């Protein structure tokens, strides 16, 4: 017969896994209603704006439209120059064909463009809610959902940005899949399916913008970092191993990232165009080292027309690589350690220095024909972006989330995975070209990290109300040492004698893998 101790050892610890998350009918209805309301607001704004996308967004927009009409890739030499935009262009063209097939009539390309990006944003909102609820609780998930809906750029993003918005949901979806993968009581087939979805979500996002793949690097490091475990029996059993599932995801990610380039080079971009026009990757590292402030924006570490103009005129790919490498070495040798610190501080100010994260920067507010949307609305938005109410309102939300995300590092309940992704994101932009709108790509992870701090603060407040908080200057709360039963005359101990029942201090935050 098994002893009580042996039987207890067989029972999975409450802190070892999270119970399956359930959604009530009312909760599903409210989430669906909020999602549809957000989609309606975004599409209404897009319909009122109706502008012709410019610069890189315009090339993606026009390229996707021409492909959907079977007219070839519009200005294919541009995509030979910047192959990072091919992924979203192909994806949009396929979506346009699907819309035309379902509707049976010519589609409105601008609304189809905005609608596709809006659906991606809505998917990210739902993934964010599920991730916070799964990792923390429903109350915190509701709080952060309301905060997100109060952030005004949320309603402008699908109509004014492109790759940053198209890839923003990939990171929170990847985090969600990893949390699901680490849950116990899942079959091998369930984990296989989850790892495949992880690869699909992150792979599609990284094919739109490579920074979306940073979350997978954080996932791999989090799985590799050894965990302190008291018993060998507490190790999670993942069928053929956690690394096996992650390798499956990695293969899917690699295939999805490379597929757009293979498709474009086979069908639309010639070898001559690739040799003549493609910009080497180290070009963006070179631009990340410049300190030439643009006259209007005062940006550093970003694209400078002189750099691009020189590289563009060089005839061969090898010569362009050599020029960029020589320029990187020269700029590094010219800087002292203090110069590097000053440069990186300026780059972080560029990245986090705009509360609107530059939505509207791609809208041609001036010089647009009157029949394209509502010029009065565009003019109002252009002016409103710099007015005090807008800056204060969005500044409180954006910088509040950023501050809470940083403070979450010190909370008792925290996510090492989100922290690794956050550090990786910032390290990447220390060496890469930086732009304020790129924070959009990571915004859902930032909100998730902020939710951890909100969860910790609400737990502390709840413990104080119950009289259980001891005043310790940490995020760990304790139950009272003495618990009375009845009026105190019939107190019992574990041995059956009258007296006081004493309990050991316990953490307010159960450990969740």
Image: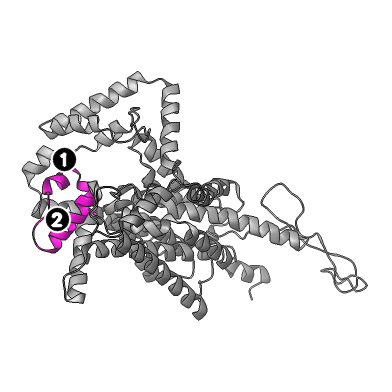
Residue 508 drawn at (x, y percent): 67, 59
x, y percent for residue 501: 83, 66
Residue drawn at point x = 35 percent, y = 68 percent: 193
Q: Are marks 2 and 1 in contact (CB under 8 Å)?
A: no
On the question of residue 459 being in view, the answer is yes
Judged left or right of residue 31, residue 379 is: left
Is residue 218 in view from this perspective? no
For the stretch drawn in magenta, the main secondary structure is: helix
- Residue linked to disc 1: 278
Q: Is residue 112 magenta?
A: no
| 17, above or below 296, in the image | below
Q: Quadrant of residue 299?
A: top left
Q: Earlier in the sequence, mark 2 or mark 1?
A: 2
- Which secondary structure lies at badge 2? helix
Task: Name the disc covering residue 263, or none.
Answer: 2
Q: Quadrant of residue 259?
A: bottom left
Q: Which residues are magenta?
A: 58-87
**Residue 85 among magenta residues:** yes
Drawn side of residue 242 relative to residue 398, left or right: left
């Amino acid at each position: 017969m098994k002893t009580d101790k042996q039987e207890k050892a067989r029972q999975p610890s409450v802190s070892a896994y999270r119970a399956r998350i359930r959604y009530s009918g009312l909760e599903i209805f409210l989430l669906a209603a909020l999602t549809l309301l957000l989609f309606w607001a975004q599409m209404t704004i897009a319909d009122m704006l109706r502008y012709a996308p410019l610069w890189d967004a315009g090339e993606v927009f026009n390229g996707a439209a021409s492909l959907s009409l079977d007219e070839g890739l519009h200005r294919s030499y541009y995509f030979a120059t910047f192959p990072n935009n091919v992924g979203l262009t192909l994806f949009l063209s396929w979506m346009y064909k699907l819309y035309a097939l379902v509707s049976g009539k010519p589609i409105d390309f601008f609304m189809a463009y905005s609608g596709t990006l809006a659906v991606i944003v809505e998917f990210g909102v739902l993934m964010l809610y599920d991730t916070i609820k799964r990792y923390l609780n429903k109350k915190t998930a509701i709080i952060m959902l309301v905060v997100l809906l109060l952030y005004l750029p949320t309603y402008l993003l699908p109509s004014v940005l492109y790759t940053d918005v198209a890839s923003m949901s990939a990171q929170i979806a990847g985090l969600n899949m990893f949390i699901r993968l680490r849950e116990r009581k899942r079959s091998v087939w369930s984990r296989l399916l989850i790892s495949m979805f992880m690869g699909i979500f992150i792979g599609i996002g990284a094919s739109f913008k490579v920074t979306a793949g940073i979350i997978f690097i954080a996932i791999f490091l989090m799985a590799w970092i050894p965990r302190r475990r008291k018993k060998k029996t507490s190790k999670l059993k993942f069928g053929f191993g956690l690394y096996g599932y992650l390798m499956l995801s990695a293969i899917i990610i690699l295939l999805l990232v490379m597929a757009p380039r293979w498709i474009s080079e086979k069908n639309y971009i010639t070898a001559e165009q690739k040799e003549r026009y493609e910009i080497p990757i180290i070009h963006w590292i070179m631009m990340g080292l410049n300190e030439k402030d643009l006259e209007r924006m005062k940006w550093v570490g970003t694209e400078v027309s002189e750099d691009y103009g020189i590289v563009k005129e060089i005839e061969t790919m090898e010569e362009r690589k050599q020029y960029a490498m020589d320029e990187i070495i020269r700029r590094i040798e010219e800087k002292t350690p203090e110069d590097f610190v000053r440069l990186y501080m300026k780059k972080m100010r560029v990245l986090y220095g705009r509360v609107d994260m530059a939505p509207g920067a791609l809208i041609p507010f001036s010089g647009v024909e009157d029949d394209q949307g509502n010029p009065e609305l565009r003019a109002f938005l252009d002016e409103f972006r710099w007015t005090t109410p807008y800056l204060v309102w969005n500044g409180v939300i954006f910088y509040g989330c950023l501050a809470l995300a940083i403070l979450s590092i010190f909370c008792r309940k925290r996510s090492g995975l989100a922290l690794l992704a956050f550090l990786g994101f910032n390290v990447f932009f220390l060496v890469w070209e930086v732009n304020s709108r790129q924070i959009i790509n990571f915004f859902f992870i930032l909100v998730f990290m902020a939710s951890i701090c909100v969860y910790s603060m609400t737990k502390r407040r709840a413990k104080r109300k119950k009289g259980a908080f001891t005043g310790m200057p940490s995020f760990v709360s304790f139950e009272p040492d003495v618990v009375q039963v009845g009026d105190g005359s019939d107190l019992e101990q574990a041995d059956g004698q009258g007296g006081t029942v004493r309990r050991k201090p316990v953490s307010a935050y159960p450990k969740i893998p």
